[in-house]
Image (tube, rainbow, N blue to C red):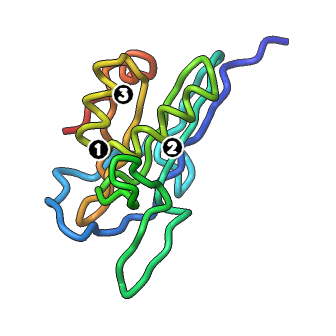
Amino acid sequence: MRCGPWRIAIERPPARAPESGPSAPAAATEDATQPGLQKVLPFTDGSLATSGDYRNYWERDGQRYSHTIDPRTGRPVEHSLASASVFHTSCAVADAYATALMVLGPDDGLQWADEKGVAALLLVYWDDGLEERTTATFRESFGSERRP
């Protein structure tokens, strides 16, 4: 019996408005079949790891603090990146890259991942939802369009 590719889902973080930021150019398209899923990826070889700030965080005096610490400042990250998903042949490398992208943020993280040929999907908080950003390598691997 021949099996098809694995179908691995990437969860859609609950939308929240960042402290400040632009309005979303358009809502991310959903190609998943279940509510709460951003995307379902088919693949036969490799690993997918996702890091995000929407499950592990704390709030104090109305301020939300991520559990991801930026080693450059020693403080929680303060940007609009909700999650970073990375596809790689090694699960450990995928996990490390996803965490690094969470530290770098949506702009620097996308640029770094594109320069290094990392297959990454970034979900970025906007005032009214989430924006999906993908690297060229991710688009080549999974056929996604780049989101502005």
Q: Nearer the viewer, mark 1 or mark 3?
A: 1
Question: Which residue is rendered at x = 39% and y = 39% of the image?
Answer: 101
- CA gap between label 1 and label 3 equals 18 Å
Quadrant of residue 134 in the image? top left
Please tell me which of labels 1 and 3 falls first in the chain: 1
**Image quadrant containing the C terminus:** top left
Count neighbours of disc 2 (C-alpha within 10 A) and say few if under 14, some if 14 to 19, many if 20 or more.
some
Please tell me which of labels 2 and 3 falls first in the chain: 2
- CA gap between label 2 and label 3 equals 13 Å
Q: Position of residue 28 (x, y in %)?
A: 32, 48
Q: Position of residue 4 (x, y in %)?
A: 69, 18
- Which residue is label 3 attached to? 144
Q: Is residue 145 left or right of residue 87?
A: left
- Which residue is label 2 attached to? 32
Indicate the secondary structure of the residue bearing disc 1: helix
- CA gap between label 2 and label 1 equals 23 Å
Relative height, residue 49 to residue 12 (above, below): above
Task: Name the kind of residue labelled 3 in the image.
Answer: Ser
Q: Position of residue 57 (x, y in %)?
A: 50, 67
Tag on residue 128? none
Quadrant of residue 104 in the image? top left
Question: Which residue is rendered at x = 31% and y = 60% of the image?
Answer: 78
Task: Name the kind of residue labelled 1 in the image.
Answer: Pro
Relative height, residue 72 to residue 100 (above, below): below
Task: Name the kind of residue labelled 2 in the image.
Answer: Ala
Total numbered circles: 3
Question: Which residue is rendered at x = 85% and y = 12% of the image?
Answer: 1
Q: Nearer the viewer, mark 2 or mark 1?
A: 1
Tag on residue 106? 1
Indicate the secondary structure of the residue bearing disc 2: loop
